[in-house]
Image (cartoon, rainbow, N blue to C red):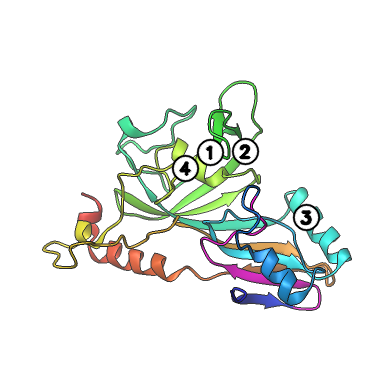
Amino acid sequence: MSLPPVIYEDDTLLAFDKPSGLLVAPDRWDKQRENLMGLVHAQLGRQVANVHRLDADTSGLLICTKTKPALDFVSGQFQSKTVAKVYHALVAVLPEERAMKVVVPVRAAAGGLPESFAVDLALGPDERQPGRMRVFKGRGGKACRTEFRVLENFGRFAFVECRPLTGRTHQLRVHLAAIGAPILNDVFYGDPTVELKLSDLKRGYKGREEEKPLVARLALHASELTLTHPVTREPLTLRSPLPHEFEIALKYLRKFPSRGRR
């Protein structure tokens, strides 16, 4: 497999546009499964190191460093939480009776999501389901905060900007699921009965009998990172464009807004 598209490169940094489905590092259980850093080391050398992770099913911006001083400097920013991260997600807004109960509800009075809100829910490993996380309402778990902004509200669906202020595993996925707006196609925390199909939006749809969803993967994309450059010491903002599937889904949600709000 060839390397993903390069978004940015200089003497110290290398940023990829990682596709959904590609692991960043070797899998804990399946060491033979293809992963980004395995490809990078094979083609560019082992001096290239990754400084942060994305879930395999999350697409978007992933930064690597080319030198040890750059690795130390950039990884220090991630550890001190001074890197600004922006994600975009397509979410399914569930009826209240199907949503998880949270400490501070954020639903608007009309049942939809407010224009902007924050979620503060501690997270930790789910002892009953290895590899997953859960909300801790009492002792246990680690403090997590995410700020959200609804960019477009389609009733049953919404296009959301996510800014995690902490960096816990599956933080965005669990926080959105906890307020009753899981990310589309989230096999861990989402609602398997909800799909975004053109036939649900377009009245009189005449397509294939075996219709595929407009977005068939986890609808979460790492869109932007802002950090301090390890050499210039100036702020550097890198951006990854929205995946094509997101653009298509948004196109039809905008075209048939009344059906999206049904």
Q: Is residue 173 above or below residue 258?
A: above
Q: Which amino acid does label 4 sit on?
A: Phe
Give the image quarter of residue 231. bottom right
The residue depicted at 64 percent of the width and 62 percent of the height is 225
Q: Main secondary structure of the magenta part?
A: loop
Q: Mark 3 points at which residue?
A: 77
Q: What residue type is labelled 1?
A: Val
Circles 1 and 3: CB atoms closer than 8 Å: no
Distance, label 2 to label 3, CA atoms, is: 18 Å
| Viewer-side residue, 162 vs 211 | 211
Q: In this view, does 50 lie above or below 128?
A: below
Mark 4 crowdedness (10 Å alpha carbons): few <14, some 14-19, many ≥20: some
Q: Mark 2 points at which residue?
A: 144
Q: Mark 4 points at which residue?
A: 188
Of the residues under marks 4 and 2, which one precedes in the sequence?
A: 2
Closest to the camera, between mark 4 and mark 3, is 4
Q: What residue type is labelled 3?
A: Gln
Q: What element carries label 2?
A: loop
Distance, label 2 to label 1, CA atoms, is: 8 Å
The residue depicted at 53 percent of the width and 66 percent of the height is 19
Q: Mark 1 points at which residue?
A: 119
